[in-house]
Amino acid sequence: MNEPEMMQRREILRRAAWLLGGAISAPAALAVLQGCSAKQEAGAPAAALKFLTAAEFAAVAEIAEILIPKTDTSGAKDAGVPAFIDVALDGLYPAEDQQRFRSGLAEFTTAAAAGGKPFLEQEPAARADFVRRSLESALAGDRKPRPFMLMTRELALLGYFTSQVGITENMEYVPVPTAYHGCVPLSQMKKPVYWE
Amino acid sequence: MSGGWAAKELTEKGLKTLVLERGHMVRHPDYPTATKDPWDLPYGNRITQETRRRKYVWARTGYPTPANEQWFVEDIENPYVEEQPFDWLRAYHVGGRSMHWARQSYRFSPMDFEANAKEGVAIPWPVTYDEIAPWYDKVEIFAGISGSVEGLPQLPDGKFLPPHDLNCVETDFQKALADKLQRKLIIGRVANLTAPLTHNESPQRGTCQARNLCIRGCPFGGYFSSVSATLPSAERTGNMTLKADQIVYEIIYDNDKGRATGVRVLDANTGAQTDYFAKVIFMCASSLASAYIMLNSTSSRFPNGFGNDSGELGCNIMDHNKPGGSSATVEGYLDVAYTGRRPNGFYIPRYRNVGKDKRNYLRGFGYQGRASRSGFGRFNDGPLMGADLKKAFKEAGPWNIGMTAFGEILPNHDNHVRLDRDKKDKHGLPLLVVNAVVRENELRMQEDMRNDAAEMLEAAGFKNVTVNSDNFHVGNSIHESGTARMGADPKKSVLNKYNQVHACKNVYVTDGSFMPSFGCQNPSLTYMAFTARAANHAVEELKKGSL
């Protein structure tokens, strides 16, 4: 593990601490570390998770990473999105939305496995293709109440863009701007997107 | 808001002043979440189900988040009875709602002070614009209000710090409205220090840092609140004693002396009861809370509530009619943006029933809005994923624009609060019953408020213009007022023109209770001006021995 990776993992551990209520625990750390490792898909210990089961967590983590992969900037897993989604599902949603998410995820994994191989055991291209089709179908269908795939997407975006790497690697984040300038040529800005 | 002003003025004039706050202590610059980064806030800074349950009234506004929850009362522990849906939005801590107000600061105009008399609505204002204008000057200079000088008769100019910029889209919208509809768009007038204050009375305050996190409390003192501005001034005099967690529930009246002698208080934590005595009392608890305390203060002299000879105490509740507005997408402007986060937007001053314009309703409305580049939310329902989505993350989003109308609500005797003595809260105090609705004039106005907004956005050439229709309940604008109106006639009003209770001159009520009509402007600046004037009046009267 090289130095930047170490740093990143420390940051993720720190995030895990607050996401899971402040006190860092070994299972929590393990869950998040596994969540950000491409090779360790299978499961976080259920005890560390707020809402998702270990198997659900693994699937959601993979979907989030397919939607927001690591490229020249961090991906969903680097940003702690899977753990964020678990905590957000637990805290932000009423029971009926939680239930819809859970049954939607079950439908997703069942449909994904129709060809014989479980979702998480498929080749990356096949997984991405299934997520794409699932997203297209969700966008074409009734979006109220929010179907599973759009809930996942929305939460992945929220988790990513409230994470330190998501914000600072994609946007100009200035905690104390000191002044507002109403009309600035984009060419004069450090990055095209200014966090607000 | 008003309490801090009363404290500052009374202590600076040499009065030993006890300030009683029912909620917890807050001291500048100790705001627990003020400098937290987005990633240091739980739940992506979204409101949890648990907070929704506990703060169920506040949750209706969309304001509470993990970053600011401390300023919003636990509704579940502080029940009231909604005979009609009514959002009573309370802030039980030192500083009250001045901690998280929207800071929009507009003078009422001569037109507003004259409207009731001219139209025969309710009762006339006992105060003219010219009488209050110097007090507006005083509070603007002390608080620090930024804005542009416009010369509009319906929205008098004040003593302003430099205005914020309009952004590129807003500037063009301003031109389009002027050219096509002869309507004015101005930058909002806001209690944020766009430049240093022009006085040396607030060394604890610095300029606004364009963080737009005011709602958490500002450690820079960049916006005006009681905690950042007026209470520190009061404290420096050495004349203030500030006690938190003290629930004032009754004014003590001495029948023989014919005056109020003090207030009765419960300790919010221990329930211990204490009486505090004073020569003069200022009620600054917010309109419904002051009405509550007065309705709960009965005696043989005032069987129907303190100072309630007129039968108007608790009645004539107003707020601002806020039924929606319009939003649109903006094409182009892709090579420009803004930097910094402006704690402000644009303002479209009232134009209906102004000059030659005549509508099928009385009074009018203004708009508050802004243009901005859309954020990551635009991806929620999009098809992009993977590397394509990541690439799009780094591009500035398209512009959009939106505005919300704030309209005048006419006073109506039937819009009222009263006490239900059979129902008690956890302190054993009776519950407040609220019954207030918008009526015919407001409903007529709502059509214009929505349609005009869309018409203006279309006139400017914006696309996908949508009319936003909100199911407005009185209270939701958090401008509730009018429950102890001032007037010349004691038979029709609770207070005189100096905010004194007609029937008990050593009690002043200077929160929004005193308003006989409400304009369409945000009211806090007016409360500040009337409070400062009332406090100076009280000191003069004490000197004369009249209290």
Image: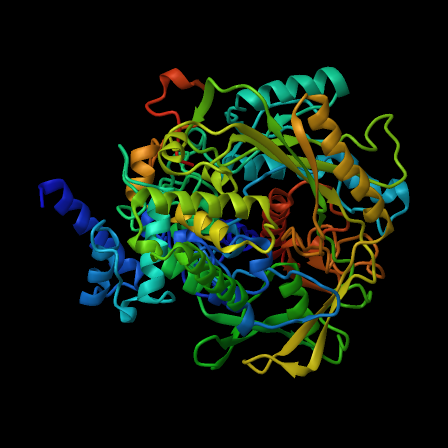
Image quadrant assignment for residue B504: bottom right
Please say if B220 is above or below B15. above
Q: Is residue A53 visible?
A: yes
Please say if B417 is above or below B208. below
Q: Residue at x 75, y 80 (%)?
A: B300
* Quarter of the figure that contains the C terminus of chain B: bottom right
Residue closest to the far front: A116
- In the image: residue A50, left or right of residue A97: left
Which residue is at the front of the view, B544 or B248? B248
Say how the picture is coloured: rainbow
Please say if A37 is above or below B88. above
Residue closest to the far left: A2
Q: Position of residue B480 (x, y in %)?
A: 67, 55
Which residue is at the front of the view, B66 or B489? B66
Q: Residue at x 75, y 74 (%)?
A: B302
Q: Residue at x 37, y 60 (%)?
A: A86
Image quadrant assignment for residue B152: top right
- In the image: residue A150, left or right of residue A175: right
